[in-house]
Amino acid sequence: MQYSPDQAEAHDSVAQALRSAGVDLQSEMILPQSEGKSQVLAILGKAGSGKTLLLAKLADAISDLGVDIISGDYEGKSRKDRRSLAILAPTNKAASVLRNRGVQATTIHRILYTPMYDPEYEKIAEWLVNGGDRPEVEGITDAALDRAKEFYGANKSIPGALAVAGLRGSDFITGWKRREEPLDIGFVDESSMLDDKQFEDLQEIFTTLILFGDPAQLAPVGQSGSMAFENVPKERQKHLTRVHRQTGDSPILDLAHALAEPDLNFHQFQRMITEISARDERVVMAPSVQSNLMARSPVLVWRNATRVRLIQAFRRAYNAPSDRLLSGEPLICDGIELPQKHRKKRIDLEARGLIKGAQVVFLGDGRKPGFSRLHVIGAEDPQVSAASIIKIEAPDQEEPFIPFAARMGAAFVHGAACTIHKAQGSQWSNVQVFAPDLEVAARMGRIEAGIPLWKRLAYVAITRAVDRLFWVQNYRLGLPSDPLNTDDLRSEIKHELTLEPMAE
């Protein structure tokens, strides 16, 4: 492919860093790794500048040389001559965006913590990854092994391959442990979301770390407005400045980049949206929030009070009872509420996708009180059953209502609306942005890192949309045309795999 000049310069910088790590893309050779300090490089650019394309092309080139791509579900036994690459994202949704583009990505958490396999079933995993003689495992037939091999050849998922052989996750994964052995190369997408602790952890694991990030996004909450890649020396930062338009141009990207105009105010920007919406159906000036869309892509807001009011309006629109959830209601994981003595259970839940900020769809009650059947959006094995603490917030109430809860487990808030901060790293086909909140931010005149806060908020919110942007103008909610259902989630299930993070 033809790189633009800034992409070519960034590519050459990454290639030089990789050469120091013993991976020579130009000579197409794997060389002994140079001894010395670990190295960090940052590739920075706004939406549409080609960061993800560059990441994907580099990953393909490295893989073609025989470097192992670490998936997070199984690594196999270490070899002295093995060289490794892990492609990471901070959240399941962000990792799934990369996987949908053909990039074998996993979450940061799945690299920090690795699964421990039952020794008998690990024989199958080793055979699938490295070949050799067909293993003999009690209870597993040759036909089951053939199914596993065929599945792995197409999907490169060890848990999936073992599942089609007739095993459950609890059969072959016995627990999780903190990574002990280092890895060679790490690519981190959406690195604007990295907090300082994650950045430190990754530098301990990888000898070469390449961060891909957007400096126009919002810094993580609690980071005092700074992003991890800002700590990378300036000479190690490469900026992509050219915008590569999508096929047929992208009015959504046009709007995002228009926010860089220093004299543009909120009302001028809103008039620009109105003008574009008149000639392009990919941008919609919406008089009200569409409740149908909220079930799978949350309305993006700035203020927490707006988020709570929209959630309550969504539940009323679907006639959801106050004491229980309906199948199909969206949730967002708010963390794991477990005492320190249950650290292994915490790791188990998080490793299976229930990390803070994960988007989840409620499928129904579990077999025991307080347990929920859940679909984790973007996870490679999305359906889990877990002890849950579900909180439904209401306006003017300090404490949320809890329709049911286990004594401890994964905590959730409702996901029909979420703050723009929490939406970073995610993308949806259709995105609704609640404009009245951004107008309030504009009137307040707040500045963050030299840029008006409303512009940062608008930029992040707009660039979450892949196909269509709905700019919601009023405090109104349209009634749904259909009841909630979960039929759309079936296409995300690649295989039947029962995962019980906390046994019922």
Image (cartoon, grey):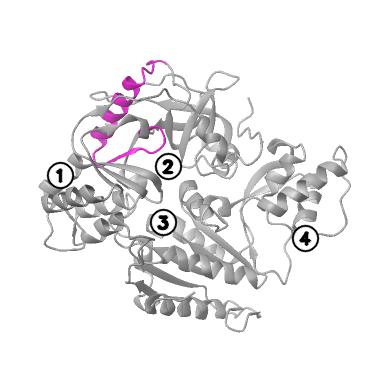
Q: Earlier in the sequence, mark 1 or mark 3?
A: 3
Q: CA distance from mark 1 to mark 3?
A: 28 Å
Q: Earlier in the sequence, mark 2 or mark 1?
A: 2
Mark 1, secondary structure of its residue: helix
Q: CA distance from mark 4 to mark 3?
A: 34 Å
Q: Nearer the viewer, mark 2 or mark 1?
A: 1
Q: CA distance from mark 2 to mark 4?
A: 35 Å
Which residue shows up at 47% across the image and 26% down it?
A: 485
Q: Earlier in the sequence, mark 4 or mark 3?
A: 4
Q: Which residue is mark 2?
A: 357
Residue sitting at the far front: 279
Which residue shows up at 65% across the image and 73% down it?
A: 65
The crowding category of the residue bearing disc 1, from other C-alpha atoms within 10 Å (few below 14, some 14 to 19, many at least 20), is: some
Q: Which residue is mark 1?
A: 439
Q: Which mark is drawn over residue 194?
A: 3
- The image shows residue 456, relative to residue 213, as above or below, that is above
The magenta segment is 294-323
> Residue 291 in the image: x percent, y percent?
33, 30
- The image shows residue 372, relative to residue 40, as above or below, that is above
The crowding category of the residue bearing disc 4, from other C-alpha atoms within 10 Å (few below 14, some 14 to 19, many at least 20), is: few
> Residue 423 in the image: x percent, y percent?
36, 46
